[in-house]
Image: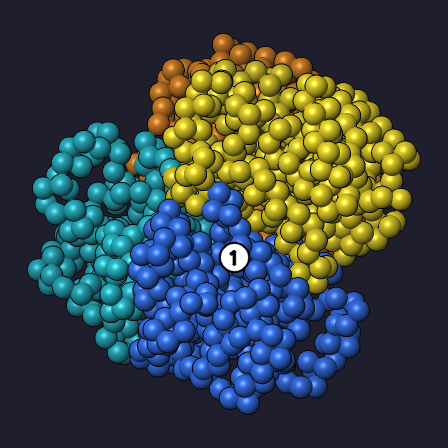
Chain colours: A orange, B yellow, C blue, D cyan
Amino acid sequence: MQKVCLVIGAGAGIGGTVGKRFATAGYHAVLCRRSDEEGLLRQVAEIEAAGGSATGRLLNAVEEGSIENCVAEVEADIGPIEVVLYNLGAQIGNRSLQETSYKNFELGWRLGTFGLFRTASVLCPRMEERGKGVILVTSATSAMRGNAGQHSHAAAMGGRRMLCQSLNAQFASSGIHVAHILIDGAVDAPDTLGKLLGAEQFQALREQRGGENDGLMLPEEIAQTYFHVAQQHRSAWTHELDLRAYSDLAWWNH
Amino acid sequence: MQKVCLVIGAGAGIGGTVGKRFATAGYHAVLCRRSDEEGLLRQVAEIEAAGGSATGRLLNAVEEGSIENCVAEVEADIGPIEVVLYNLGAQIGNRSLQETSYKNFELGWRLGTFGLFRTASVLCPRMEERGKGVILVTSATSAMRGNAGQHSHAAAMGGRRMLCQSLNAQFASSGIHVAHILIDGAVDAPDTLGKLLGAEQFQALREQRGGENDGLMLPEEIAQTYFHVAQQHRSAWTHELDLRAYSDLAWWNH
Amino acid sequence: MQKVCLVIGAGAGIGGTVGKRFATAGYHAVLCRRSDEEGLLRQVAEIEAAGGSATGRLLNAVEEGSIENCVAEVEADIGPIEVVLYNLGAQIGNRSLQETSYKNFELGWRLGTFGLFRTASVLCPRMEERGKGVILVTSATSAMRGNAGQHSHAAAMGGRRMLCQSLNAQFASSGIHVAHILIDGAVDAPDTLGKLLGAEQFQALREQRGGENDGLMLPEEIAQTYFHVAQQHRSAWTHELDLRAYSDLAWWNH
Amino acid sequence: MQKVCLVIGAGAGIGGTVGKRFATAGYHAVLCRRSDEEGLLRQVAEIEAAGGSATGRLLNAVEEGSIENCVAEVEADIGPIEVVLYNLGAQIGNRSLQETSYKNFELGWRLGTFGLFRTASVLCPRMEERGKGVILVTSATSAMRGNAGQHSHAAAMGGRRMLCQSLNAQFASSGIHVAHILIDGAVDAPDTLGKLLGAEQFQALREQRGGENDGLMLPEEIAQTYFHVAQQHRSAWTHELDLRAYSDLAWWNH
């Protein structure tokens, strides 16, 4: 059976690109995203055109049982999940406390924290039994410090980071490698940053900092490090690392 | 009108004792706890016997609207809340991932993170209008690092800490002092540690480390620092501090 | 014998003011500074005029044996040092790597890190024997993150912070309270910020942010917290806390 | 001209092995260590036998001008240093404050902090002019928290970490990639851990945790991550990451 890399949150930025990177190395990539079936099919087709294998799934991660069923079905139908990338974001842009509804705050937690807990709850026992597994978690600056306007996002990501540490503490010695990967900068990704900024602003940002300036983080390059971490020998595992463009200040410098 | 100190989570440990400390200084203490009406009445009676003034309220913080109504009623009936202490814990003891149900994990978040968000959502606009206010938040070691068995607690407290930072970032310049107080050790408190350990183990711990050994944190002494922080002049505010017994190692040392 | 509060680095900002605060509470304040004998005598006179007792000493802390002799003489002539405030700064303003000479870098370490090590080396055994003592250490944002232009300062303060933690780890259980106090903002202090900015810029800053705006940290208010920390009961000690003006962003927010 | 990887602190553990890893990829490795010329020659011979190219140099890093001359000579005689690994340790084993002499403390700083400053001072202007360069810095748990017995080591490593951050803040946008790599565990390295423990204890540790248990960190595997970091595209650089064996707890968990 082929080893599987499951991507929860496989947009056209980090998620999809990491899936593609693993597919290149012989993994079967299972790409899950909430919407845009067309985009999803295109991603699968691209991987297959390059000689890899992939499956696309629409997945509404906040729906009860959705992640749990997905994991069970993938393991039954395709093969054991060796690597999972939890890549769901919870960024809703800068909003003051008054502009942050209870519903938004709860949704932030459901996507940012609880979804990872659910994923781990169903996958860790399976991985533990197999004595190996990799859980890659994309994280954000807000996991390290709360800014004004980030009430929902910071709370969700702060919880996510601590959850990664507790998962690592329980499961590393059983062979499960949990990595908390801090994306500390703007990613050149139309599905996330693009939607957040709107088409026009995103284009302007790309012209100013993107292209040969390398001032936007390139998903292809980010994916190299995700892949490297997943391949680390168990005598030298990374639990936490940051990533940012050379031209950006680190979060602690601004 | 008397200035009010509202305590959400006023058990016989930190919460009730901090309420009493503020009452000693002339605040009207509003003590809220989920159960044990008898204990609550006793706390109020003690404060009154010492010449202070206090009100007790039973409050189920996870119930919809409970905190919101409490704040509205206290402000309408008693006076403006100058200090709020958010003291609800989310510790459920060490449990492996498999032993941590979705319900427990969600409850941890409701008590540990969302309740503070709700409190801030209703109180910050009021405090902002008055140009002053103090939000004291009791926190735990799990806000700083996740241990095995602390999946729910660490996620809840990690979220709480980041929320404190984002609240501080938005509201400090409007005169609202948010303080994240890290309780990094065992508190000599029958309502929390006592219940967690059970009567017998708690008594044994008290005999071994408590009393004149001062190896358990004394709520009366903790309360002195809470009070000090709330009185700091706005040119020199503390946002985060830790507290532990002299005989304990700091969380980063073990 | 009177209990002694020794201040190493007693300029007209935090150092001298903390000394005065302890003198008000009955300590004999020993104020040490490198230069400005006149200013030193004035500080002593002020304390005495207010009914307190104090001694002034000129002390070149980088000179071999200077701190060691000072401690020995104070203990022999005046009394046991119950509280020491290590308040020597190592800020030399923003300088690029190329503008930071080896000599500057080494001086930063001598003042920022090594001086504290020397102080602890001679005082901790004495305090340990007495079963009590307080070591207050003024620290700076640069202990938490290195910015461009802070090569010397950040290295010195980063070392200082870790040294505080190792001292605390060894000596807390012997009754020595070590506190690392992060001054995260501009202090209204002519001897440090004033000299760094020059008279004109300092006056402009004071007009813009000082006075009733409370946007500069007031030494008198800072001193209240130093004093509180030194009086904490050993069942509830603070090892680290931050201080900043309400109108300032925390270091992690900018 | 061949691109050069300079290793300062090239013992038979991380340093030498990283040098070998870069040599495999076509770099000329310059291995510098204080003593054991025989060992050094053997390392060079091994690299050459594998088809790589290398130079060995004896270097007493604390000696005035030693690092500076080394850099100048290597650049003049061999080629531009594209990657430098600063790998000098400052661990002297657990010693109480009383057992830590001023001389030891200063030596810790000279090796742990000042040597990196000197290296950066001579290399950064050269790298800046070339618009690229990589500075890899091996670091230790003591950079993150001070334990009892680690007074010298923690102060040195805390300073080193903050210096890495300030170097990164000044030079990243000029194309210099600074990485602070936290080795959070015991490395299977005879020249460092072996000497610290003594032959017998080291052998016992190896038998208990080493070999197929992978409980000691293997230099060959560590080197893979060092190499990966040095190859990261400038749109996605890592500044800080940790490494530990799967069977070890992270520093924050014990």
Q: In this view, does D56 lie above or below B105?
A: below
Q: What's the residue type where badge 1 is placed?
A: Ala
Instruction: Pick the residue in front: B1 or B90.
Output: B1
Task: Look at the image and tell me whether residue A202 can be seen.
Answer: no
The residue lying at 30 percent from left, 47 percent from top is D223
Q: In this view, does C214 lie above or below B17?
A: below
Among the 4 quarters of the image, the one containing residue B64: top right
Give coordinates of residue D49: x percent, y percent. Answer: 14, 52
Image quarter in which the C terminus of chain D is found = top left
The residue lying at 48 percent from left, 21 percent from top is B197
Instruction: Pick the residue in front: A241 or C137.
Output: C137
Q: In this view, does D19 lie to the left or right of A197?
A: left
Which residue is the site of mark 1? C230
Among the 4 quarters of the image, the one containing residue D251: top left
Give coordinates of residue A230: x percent, y percent. Answer: 42, 34
Task: Look at the image and tell me whether residue A68 can be seen.
Answer: yes
